[in-house]
Image (cartoon, rainbow, N blue to C red):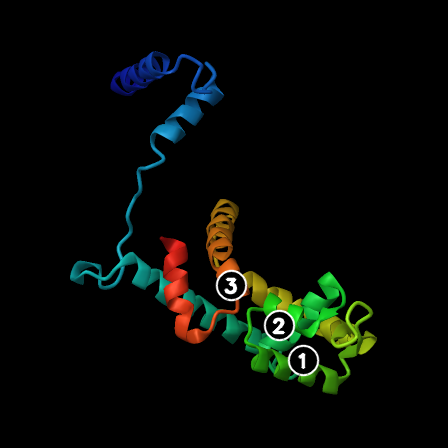
Amino acid sequence: MNYSLIKDVLDLIQQFEAENNNVSGFEFSVKGFKNWISATNKDYVIEPDWEGKENGRSPESVINTLIVHMNRYAKSYSKSAIFGSDFSTQEDFIYLINLKAFGEMSKMDLIKKNVHEKPVGMQIINRLVNQGWVEQRNSKADKRSKVISITHNGLTALENQMNKIRQATAIVTGDLTHAEKMELIRLLNKLNDFHQPIYDKNIETEYLLNEALKAKN
């Protein structure tokens, strides 16, 4: 029996009791003890290695590069998933999936949901209209704008390809465990919550970087 380990654990429990008077929110239980250990070590980070680290390459540079790479990997799997179908690009079926999931919406709402610039988004929508996969009509709320919705043909085209699309979606997360996926979602949501309000302001390209830096500070 490892008596040294037992002594270390007892010392840790003694420290827990000494520091916690139940005002801090840690109950005197196994659960409270585990939560206390987690909170005590929350600032402890195991820093990974990365290419160029020894030469001063920053974490921000690595994160940017890996995000770009992941986007390219995802696009390559998507291209494989739609190979031989009537879909031209990954964005085609993503737009259809959004319309199926959220219902009809204005063109600009759909474009913004996919974080595209207007010219790119309009090209995608026009392509879907020409395919007969979406239809447009005048908005009841604003006669000057049009709303679009997915058609029966669009639903059929999407359903015919959904099995491969799901496979392409699943493979992007590789061999991450469930816990790792949940943590990645949390971090990506945090990043998205930072960038989305900046994007929604439609800031001119010339001023975008400066405005984003202000938001960070």
Q: For residue 93, which numbered disc appears in the image?
A: none
Amino acid type of disc 1? Answer: Ile
Whole-percent x and y of residue 7? 28, 15
Q: Is residue 133 left or right of residue 31?
A: right
Q: Which quadrant of the view contains residue 128? A: bottom right
In the image shown, does 142 or 44 lie closer to the viewer? 142
Label 1 – label 3 distance at C-alpha: 26 Å
Which numbered disc flags the more N-terminal residue, 2 or 1? 2
Amino acid type of disc 3? Answer: Val
Whole-percent x and y of residue 79? 56, 78
Label 2 – label 3 distance at C-alpha: 23 Å
Instruction: Please report contact status of discs 2 and 3: CB closer than 8 Å, yes or no.
Output: no
Circle 3 crowding by C-alpha within 10 Å: few under 14, some 14–19, many from 20: some
Q: Is residue 169 left or right of residue 24?
A: right
Label 1: which secondary element: helix
Identify whether 81 is placed above or below 24.
below
Which numbered disc flags the more N-terminal residue, 1 or 3? 1
Query: Mark 1 highlights which residue?
Result: 125
Circle 1 crowding by C-alpha within 10 Å: few under 14, some 14–19, many from 20: many
In the image shown, does 195 or 6 lie closer to the viewer? 195
Whole-percent x and y of residue 84? 64, 84
Instruction: Please report contact status of discs 2 and 1: CB closer than 8 Å, yes or no.
Output: yes
Query: Mark 2 highlights which residue?
Result: 111
Query: Mark 3 highlights which residue?
Result: 172
Residue situated furthest left in the rendering: 55
